[in-house]
Image (cartoon, coloured by chain):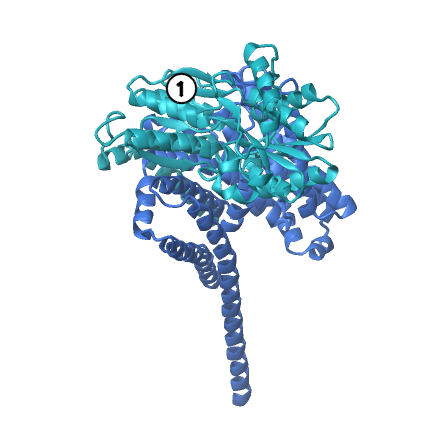
Amino acid sequence: MKKLTQRIDKERLLLGIAAPLLAVVAALVVTTLVILATGKNPGAAFSDMVTYGSASDSQVYILNKATTYYLAGVSVAIGFRMNLFNIGVDGQYRIAAFFAAVLGGALTTPGWISIPLIILCAMATGALWAGIAGVLKVTRGVSEVISTIMLNSIATAIIAYLLQPGKLAELQSGGTVVSTKPLPESSYFFQIDTGASGELWGFIVIAVAIGVAYWFVLGRTRFGFDLRTVGQSEPAAAASGVSVKKMIATSMLISGAVAGLIGMPTLLNDSHQFSNDFPLGIGFTGIAIALLGRNNPIGIALGALLWGFLERTTNHLEFEGYDKEILGVIQGVIVLCVVIAYELVRRYGLKRQQQRVGAELAAQAAATTQKQEVA
Amino acid sequence: MRRVAKLSAACIATAALALTATACGSTSSENSSSTSPSSSSGGGKGGIKIGLAYDVGGRGDRSFNDSAARGADKAAKEFGGSIKELTAKSSDTEADREQRLTDLADAGYNPIVAVGFSYATSVDKVAPKFPKVSFGLIDSVATSKNVDSITFTEEQGSYLAGVAAALKTKKNHVGFIGGVDTPLIKKFEAGYVQGVKDTNPKVKVDVQYLTHGSDFSGFASPDKGKEAASGMLDAGADVIYAAAGSSGNGSIEAVSGVKGAWAIGVDSDQYNIPGLAKYKNSILTSMVKNVDVGVYDFIKSVNDGKPLTGQQNYSLAKGGVSLATSGGFIDDIQPKLDEAKKKIVDGTITVKTS
């Protein structure tokens, strides 16, 4: 029996790897065709991507970017596991980062108090913002897709209103950049100095911790089991005594809390203030990365790294004279391919399973008839 | 348990790999310097190597970035140099902007012009690492020694646009469309509104921004510009001034569909932009911000071996901003515009910046 489970595990693992691999290969082929169509040499482009992307300062850039993307991917994946489509991660992390930056700028306490406070404030704000959608869904049955995407716009408007000189922000020298009060130096998060390659953000440690927590809570606790059950079948979960409404509200809160962390690497390690050029759209990147990583903690990490690599190297491709739109094409194609590849592999797996079950049943039937004949 | 071990092993392996990979290996600048030796300074035998980092929209936005491109083109032609252009994306982070500037500096481009205030922080981070390279920063002020901050008094030019709008409106109703509600664009709005009100207090001014806060897509969305302009036209406005990068193209298109309505262009003299030729009879004037002059002056100074540093403020008095007269639609009100201009230059009128 043990042998059998091992065999299936291996096959499932193989199928699991096949899908993203197929997607990346298909994306490569399509990208090659696109570059060929623009009359450039794809071989040189790919080799430039590899040499440039593997340089040590590129590695630091990729890891820093991936830290942010990983948190976004996990935040979206929590919703996905629950069958909740949290499109609002984008608004959640921005409003969370904004209020955290305001708090951080006002705090004069030593770093070991300020930093946890800033992070907690961001998580609470993110959770609160996502919680609105959760409450609407539970009490009024409002689809979270609609409510979260509207909450994104509301978040943008609130930030735009408060991020003005005289409200919660100040005008920087030069008179063109508005930002919140910069964090005092004691509130900077630690970073690893790698010399000429730049600084590796210390927040990567927190991102890894979140990944481990995600894997543990979902895979190893009663709560995680309930969550996945609700995601797979609400009536089944309800029948086994899980309160579906409570689960929806809680998972929305957790997803929002993790979303609150997305802006933290940028805030605590890089910009140290929330200004009008704070990065946006990472919540949507998170959706692509969660899809790419199949909601798996390691898969999301690989997806986040791939995304960082693509951004770093395609920025340089533009420098080499290729069209800058290539990045958008590659990313779009990868996501499309992933969705298609997973579906293909799923169907193939299902077919294999059916065939095996069929074969076993046939063998059993044959054995019984043989037995009967003997008898 | 088996899975725990497998997972943790994978985690440790990945982390170890990442850290070792980070620790060793050469940086991209070392890689590139080994393949392409960078010229020591500008103005060498190959001519001046100009690096341009555009804001969102890039060359071809028929407005702000194009104006910078014209200045660089002129300089390159005159001094026999080459130009390398990179363009920002709206999803950029600080790291992307720094990478863009660093890539240019690594490849030996000097001077490097950062077009747009988004680059302010990045220039201050990158410039000290390349003390021999001259950086130009448009629309903002940087503190590093080797940076020339090129700024304009947009509010003064916009004031004149406001005067023209107030004199040309028949319905006593005009509009202003801003790309993003940044302090820079608010300068345009403040000057415009003041110009309108000083000329005719009865004129109503509609103000709309396309995007807010950190969403910079308002500078590169002609569809949004078109929609906003249509809304204002429907509400009764008949002169619309759009300071919105390439989104302004949409606004001009919408205005051209209404008889008797005027559009006021921005940054470049949009009457003479080939891509907008179809609509040029609806373009009353343009508030020309001579970014090209700023860029050209800066490149010339580097070529002459005396790079400009500090802040160069291109005001109305110095011809940094002006109203375009192409098409001759404002010839009849020119005396009044000249009077307003004189008052601004001699200080009788102080134009507000916010």
- Assign a secondary structure to mark 1: strand
Q: Nearer the viewer, residue B28 or B245?
A: B245
What residue is at 70 percent from the left and 43 percent from the top? A147
Q: Nearer the viewer, residue B101 or A368?
A: B101
Percent from the top left, x then y, of residue A143? 71, 48
Label 1 CA crowd tier, 10 Å (few <14, some 14–19, many 20+) = many
Colour in which the image shows chain A = blue
Question: Which residue occupies the extreme right position in the image?
Answer: A140
Left or right of A358 in this view: A313: left
Percent from the top left, x then y, of residue B234? 72, 40
Percent from the top left, x then y, of residue B2? 46, 49
What residue is at 51 percent from the left and 86 percent from the top? A370
Q: Nearer the viewer, residue A171 or A48?
A: A171
The correct choice, above or below, for A186 with respect to A95 in the image is: above
What residue is at 32 percent from the left and 40 percent from the top? A52
The correct choice, above or below, for B84 with respect to B334 in the image is: below
| Visible residue check, residue B99 | no
Residue B310: image quadrant is top left
Colour in which the image shows chain B = cyan
Left or right of B56 in this view: A49: left
| Visible residue check, residue A365 | yes
Left or right of B72 in this view: A127: right
What residue is at 70 percent from the left and 41 percent from the top? A133
| Residue type marked 1 | Asp
Q: Which residue is mark 1?
A: B148
Percent from the top left, x then y, of residue A39? 34, 53
The correct choice, above or below, for B272 with respect to B300 in the image is: below
**Label 1 lies in what chain?**
B
